[in-house]
Image (cartoon, rainbow, N blue to C red):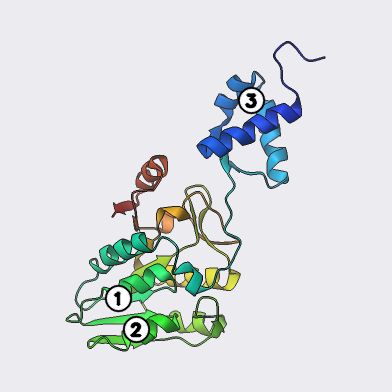
Amino acid sequence: MRKAGEKSTVQRRVIILEMLEEKGQVDVTTLSKELMVSEVTVRNDLKRLEQKNALIRARGGAMKIDRVGTDFAISDKNKQNYEQKKRIGKAAAALIEEGDTIILDSGTTTMEITKNLSPLSELTVITNALNIADQLAEHPKANVIVPGGFLRKNSLSLIGSTAEESFKNYFCDKLFLAVDGLSVVYGLSTPNVEEAHLNRVMISISKQVIVVADSSKFLKRSFAFMAPITAIDILITDDGIPLEDQKKLESAGVKVIIV
């Protein structure tokens, strides 16, 4: 028999999901007080809800599930948060120095970097994105290297073992990496497993990893894990970034540039 004021299991879990929807994240201690049950009971509720894919458990609590499972075509991605991507691309291009060897990952935000490259700068660009390589053909001083591989039509990118082996032949100054999901708990992610594997190779050969992601990518987890946030040196994003995430990233040693 329940005590006065004590809620049923179903009622508790509904309240938990409602709080997640409102706040994006909840912690065990707060839930315990709010629901007037033990922290053990709350953790069990969170465990059961995660098993039903209703939330993502995080250290000390849980976060709202907002997966990026769909692998959108690049033409569709171009329409999403375009103004933010333009600002991010311009800020990222400003970090490139004369003589740099850089990697431009496939993506609509990295394409904005390409559009902002100074035509007066000598640089070497390695990219697995055919649309970016095509844009760079017009750059008078860029040496462009395109690895082999299998074409992913959705992203116009080359992936697979051939691309990975090709990237391993180089050492690069800066990697500009686009992501579909960015979580301080679960790291960087993307819908395609092979793309994620190639991204890890890119990270391993780069002195500096610069992630370019508009704020809509936060609190999202896509299918394939790419890297933890500790792999990031610089993040360039817009002012929609959750303040708590910004603080956690900076505490982890990531320089956050907001445009």
Residue that mark 2 sits on: 135
Other-residue count near label 2 (Cα within 10 Å), few / some / many at <14 / 14–19 / ≥20: few
Q: Are marks 1 and 3 in contact (CB under 8 Å)?
A: no
Q: What residue is pinned by disc 3?
A: 39
**Amino acid of disc 1:** Lys
- For the residues bearing labels 1 and 2, Cβ distance under 8 angstroms: yes
In this rendering, would 123 be left or right of 237? left
Residue 180 lies, with reference to residue 39, above or below; the image says below
The amino acid type of the residue labelled 2 equals Gln
Q: Is residue 249 visible?
A: yes
Q: Nearer the viewer, residue 104 or 119?
A: 119
Between circles 3 and 2, the one closer to the viewer is: 2
Q: What's the residue at 58%, 68% (across, down)?
A: 71
Q: Disc 1 marks which residue?
A: 115
In three-dimensional space, the C-alpha distance between marks 1 and 2, rounded to whole angstroms, equals: 8 Å
Left or right: 95, with 14 as reference point: left
